[in-house]
């Protein structure tokens, strides 16, 4: 079956603009995760969804970051008033709870100019 | 807090040879999982192998095997018969049995030479 997909693949935005990043998990996967990968900080956890609920939002770096998941499927990560330090690759992963393996999408490279 | 350490920023191996990538972790939990992920230049994180902490037997997947030393909190990856396609960043990752998120090491870049 199809893997995790993310869109867009690349996004260039101006500082101060809002961006939305999309993740389509593997069909039937109940858990969805967002991570951020940057040169300075490595791979960081952002948020975890189980169904449409987010029991762990501990990795969101500021209130400019938010995420939602609808229909237990697609998730959107929104970054408001983007800053240059938001430039990174944003990775989405999904898993079939309670299996521990997480399967990743190809990521969205965000560049804030 | 759980931490994962990969002390080898870069490694190199000749084609057909064997290489071992190191990983250590720190945790007070007894129930957890360990993983190795591969990230080629395409950015796609690919699951290579997984190990449950309660299992004494080391996991093996084809040319990939681990040496899991629970008491030493060590989890190394051995790649046998290395191939050009094995060239990538390799990340060691940890998660507890109850928590959801993965905690990653800083990665090891593996080069495969002819």
Image: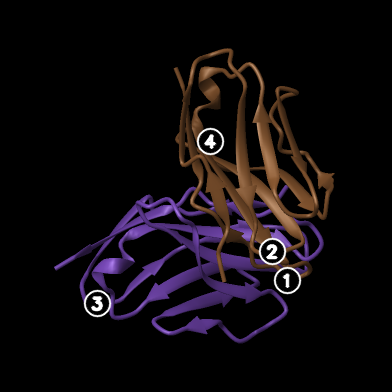
Chain colours: A brown, B purple
The residue where tag 1 is placed is: A99
Which mark is in front, 3 or 2? 2
Q: Are marks 3 and 2 in contact (CB under 8 Å)?
A: no
The residue where tag 2 is placed is: A95
Numbered disc 1: what chain? A
Q: Residues within 10 Å of mark 4 (few under 14, many from 20)?
A: few
Residue at 41 percent of width and 75 percent of height: B78
- Which type of secondary structure does the marked residue at label 1 adopt? loop
User: Looking at the image, which is closer to me, A64 or A14?
Assistant: A14
Q: Position of residue B69 (x, y in %)?
A: 58, 74
The residue where tag 3 is placed is: B17
Q: Are marks 1 and 4 in contact (CB under 8 Å)?
A: no
The answer to whether A102 is drawn above or below residue A107 in the figure is: below
State the separation of the CA atoms marked 3 and 4.
Answer: 32 Å
Which mark is in front, 3 or 1? 1
Upstream in sequence: badge 1 or badge 4: 4
Residue at 75 percent of width and 23 percent of height: A63
- Which type of secondary structure does the marked residue at label 3 adopt? loop
Q: Are marks 2 and 1 in contact (CB under 8 Å)?
A: yes
The answer to whether A2 is drawn above or below residue A46 in the figure is: below
The answer to whether B91 is drawn above or below residue A59 in the figure is: below
Residue at 55 percent of width and 66 percent of height: A2
- Which type of secondary structure does the marked residue at label 2 adopt? strand
State the separation of the CA atoms marked 4 and 2.
Answer: 24 Å
Whether callout 3 and callout 1 share a subunit is answered no
Q: Position of residue A27 (x, y in %)?
A: 68, 65
């Amino acid at each position: 079956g199809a893997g995790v997909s993310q869109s867009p693949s690349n996004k260039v935005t101006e500082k101060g603009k809002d961006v939305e990043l999309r993740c389509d998990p593997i069909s039937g996967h109940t858990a969805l995760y967002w991570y951020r990968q940057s040169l300075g900080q490595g791979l960081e956890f952002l948020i975890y969804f189980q169904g449409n609920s987010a029991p762990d939002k501990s990795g969101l770096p500021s209130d400019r970051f938010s995420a939602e998941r609808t229909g237990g499927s697609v998730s959107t990560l929104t970054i408001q008033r983007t800053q240059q330090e938001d430039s990174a690759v944003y990775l989405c992963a999904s898993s079939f709870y309670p299996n521990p393996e997480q399967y990743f999408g190809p990521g969205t490279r965000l560049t804030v100019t | 807090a759980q931490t994962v350490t990969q002390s080898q920023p870069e490694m190199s191996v000749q084609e057909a040879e064997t290489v071992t990538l190191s990983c250590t972790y720190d945790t007070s939990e007894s129930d957890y999982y360990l993983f190795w992920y591969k990230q080629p230049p395409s950015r796609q994180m690919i699951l290579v192998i997984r190990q449950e902490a309660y299992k004494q037997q080391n996991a093996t997947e084809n040319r990939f095997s681990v040496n899991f030393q629970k008491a030493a909190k060590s989890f190394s990856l051995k790649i046998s018969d290395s191939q050009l396609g094995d060239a990538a960043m390799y990340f060691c990752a940890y998660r507890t049995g109850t928590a959801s998120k993965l905690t990653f090491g800083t990665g090891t870049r593996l080069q495969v030479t002819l």
